[in-house]
Amino acid sequence: MADWSAGLVPHVVPERPCPCKQWSKVPAGPDRLNLLMKMWVDGLPGESREALREFVLDPGTSDNMSLGTFCSGTDCAVQVFQSFLAACAASFEIPVADMPRFQHLFSCEKDQKKGEFLRRFCNMGRLHPDALEPVGEHAAVVSAGFPCDDACALHPHSSSDKHRTCGSLRTGAVFRSIAKYLAENDKVSFFQFENVVALANKPSKQNQKVAGPSNLSAVCYVLDKQCDMWSHVWQVDSRDFGSGQQRQRLYGSCFKKNMLSMTLTKAHAICSETMKLLVGVEPCHPTEYLLPETSGVLQAEQSLQLMRSLPAEAFLLGDSKEPSSSATWSIAQLFQSHGTLPCALNVANKRRKLTKQTSDPASPKSRWVQVHADAFRQRGEESLDGLRF
């Protein structure tokens, strides 16, 4: 039985990047990600910008633009890829036909609603219902999310090595399945994971001794030993990138060791410098995300809520005082309320006759028929024989 508290699992401390420059504010709106990506690409230092241009123009880059996602539940990774390529095309003035081809090969999502969202929004190859099922597609880039507790590959409070590694249990199985895919797929070159800050918390102490490594340390340990990948983890705030909402998250960027052409120390230094170029965007104020009062969507919603709050009497015309089967309703107000009837009227009035029944049901005298009959007579067509209303 391994003694996890003996330091066999290196303790991983996420890096909190400090900006090396101050970026201007990017306005809130549906195009914010595209504008943000374009600003970053345009603002890269000379050598980095030229290296990125060569990477985009390299014919082999398309082989590294295939994406697979595990339990992400969102389209974030897809949007980032698409915005990145669009920003490079615009910044370097490269025709779209000459840009690398992005492919979303697969997603693994157990939640039915999230899976339906991915199926509708993303043009992906295949949707797998569970990460525990075998995945046959070979992606070069993998993006994944997993529960904080599930990520714990080491349960220090258990005396059993079987329970500590969670190898045969559902707990920990999602992350284990992701690690299995990374280890068996030779094409994978990059793995990105996102999780809550609590992933890096140390376990509770017992008898003044550290019980074991953090879940984050366990994740990086498994990626190192089982997947032959080295990891660099940041703790970032969404406001570092100009968001109006504060949200702390861990992001881990993991690379295959056989891709290294330098020392691991230098590789970590490059990761740190790269992130410093991206943070420091002036944050938007939360009010900037609100629709202006002149917005048609907002005015329609306000009108709907106002009409729903009015009593039934507000919809009556003339001397009508109470809502009843013989009351005359204001068509204008009903139209402005988007067809919403007062609560007091309810659905029951739909079954009532709003016009009095004539003595002869075969000869209706509705206002609609009378108006058209008068129109025919004014045109000199006195005979209405053969017309049925």
Image (cartoon, grey):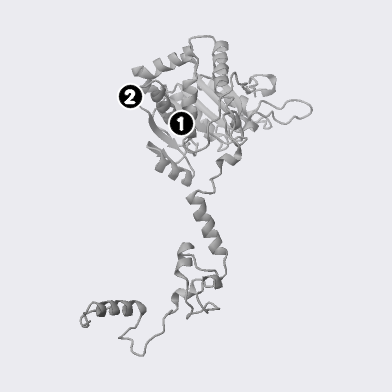
Give above or below for 92 relative to 242.
above
Q: Position of residue 221 (x, y in %)?
A: 58, 22
Q: Residue at x 54, y 56 (%)?
A: 302
| Residue in front for this viewpoint, 182 or 189 | 189
Using residue 69 as the reference point, say whether residue 282 is left or right of it. right
Q: Amino acid at mark 1?
A: Asn
In this figure, which residue is indicated by the disc labeled 2? 95
Furthest toward the top, the residue is 262
| Residue in front for this viewpoint, 378 or 385 | 378
* Disc 2 element: loop
In this figure, which residue is indicated by the disc labeled 1? 34
Using residue 380 as the reference point, say whether residue 370 is left or right of it. right
Q: Position of residue 123 (x, y in %)?
A: 37, 37
Q: Amino acid at mark 2?
A: Pro
Furthest toward the bottom, the residue is 359
Q: Residue at x 44, y 43 (%)?
A: 117
Quarter of the N terminus within the rendering: top right
Give above or below for 342 relative to 249.
below
Q: Residue at x 57, y 39 (%)?
A: 288
The tally of labels here is 2
Q: Position of residue 20 (x, y in %)?
A: 59, 18
The residues tagged by marks 1 and 2 sit, at their Cα atoms, a distance apart of 17 Å
| Residue in front for this viewpoint, 26 or 146 | 26
Quarter of the C terminus within the rendering: bottom left
| Residue in front for this viewpoint, 30 or 229 | 30
Q: Position of residue 276 (x, y in %)?
A: 58, 20
Task: Tell me if mark 2 has few (under 14), some (14-19) or many (20+) residues whose alpha carbon lies within 10 angstroms of its own.
Answer: few
